[in-house]
Image (cartoon, rainbow, N blue to C red):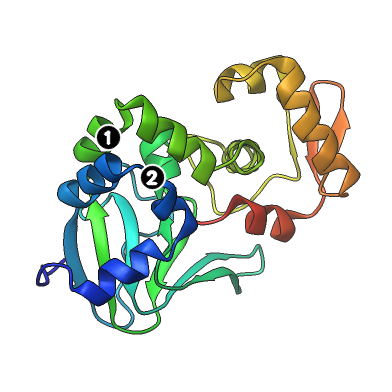
Amino acid sequence: MPHAPPLSPAHRRTLEGNPWFAALPAAQRGALLGAAERVHLQRGAMPFRQGDPVGAAGSGFYGLLAGTLKISTLRDDGREAILVLLEPGNWFGEITLIDGSPRTHDATALTGVDLLVVPPFAFAAQMADPVFANAMATLRGLRVRVVHRLLALARGDATQSATLRPSVAVPQEALAMMLGVTRQTLSKELNTLAQLGLIGLRYRRIELLQLEALQRVGGAN
């Protein structure tokens, strides 16, 4: 991706308008910005595609400075499903860097966009700071992590098939271990998702009842 000039005051104001970024202590904000490269993408360019691994060219943790990005995937019938439109100030793309899974969505520039890109090695260094790691947990809450993991399992996890399975054969104890949480904490999130009608809980199996709604909850990766 082509490099662009340093941050302008307007771009800094855009970032500081994001509650998550604004809540970071000054030291962590400075370290994050210092680790990032600023790049410009033309309309139609894709920062990442579904299935891209962690080490793909241009991969990283992204901050959107200007323009609009579309996060989408393909339905079983081959039609595009737009999950979210990202506007300036948003940070995204951290899940692949945290759990090592391939990208689960396409990201496409709907306009010319300016991005901050924190490369994987720099992101890993940031995550070694407990303050930053805790902030990342806030950015990507447990419910989103649960849904993302279920969708990854529904795609075959490692193979990441474009076709989602309607159910995932996984004991809740194993799922809790994958996410690094207690069985009781996971159970609360799963029960909430079940009450919302998004999943069905069965013995050693979880049914995915509303795939498009789950993908919206899963957000941008």
Q: Amino acid at mark 1?
A: Gln
Secondary element at image label 2: loop
Check disc 2: other Cα within 10 Å, few if <14, some if 14-19, many if 20+.
some
The image shows residue 80 at horizontal and vertical percentages of 57, 73
Report the front residue among 125 and 193: 125
Height in image: 40 above or below 155?
A: below
The image shows residue 146 at horizontal and vertical percentages of 64, 36
Between the C-alphas of marks 2 and 1, the distance is: 12 Å
Q: Are marks 2 and 1 in contact (CB under 8 Å)?
A: no
Q: Is residue 204 left or right of residue 114?
A: right
Residue 24's tag is 2
Height in image: 198 above or below 111?
A: above
Residue positioned most to the front:
26
Mark 1 lies on residue: 126
The image shows residue 148 at horizontal and vertical percentages of 59, 42
Q: Is residue 86 left or right of residue 45?
A: right
Q: Amino acid at mark 2?
A: Leu
Height in image: 58 above or below 3?
A: above
Residue 107's tag is none
**What residue do we see at 84% from left, 34% from top?**
191
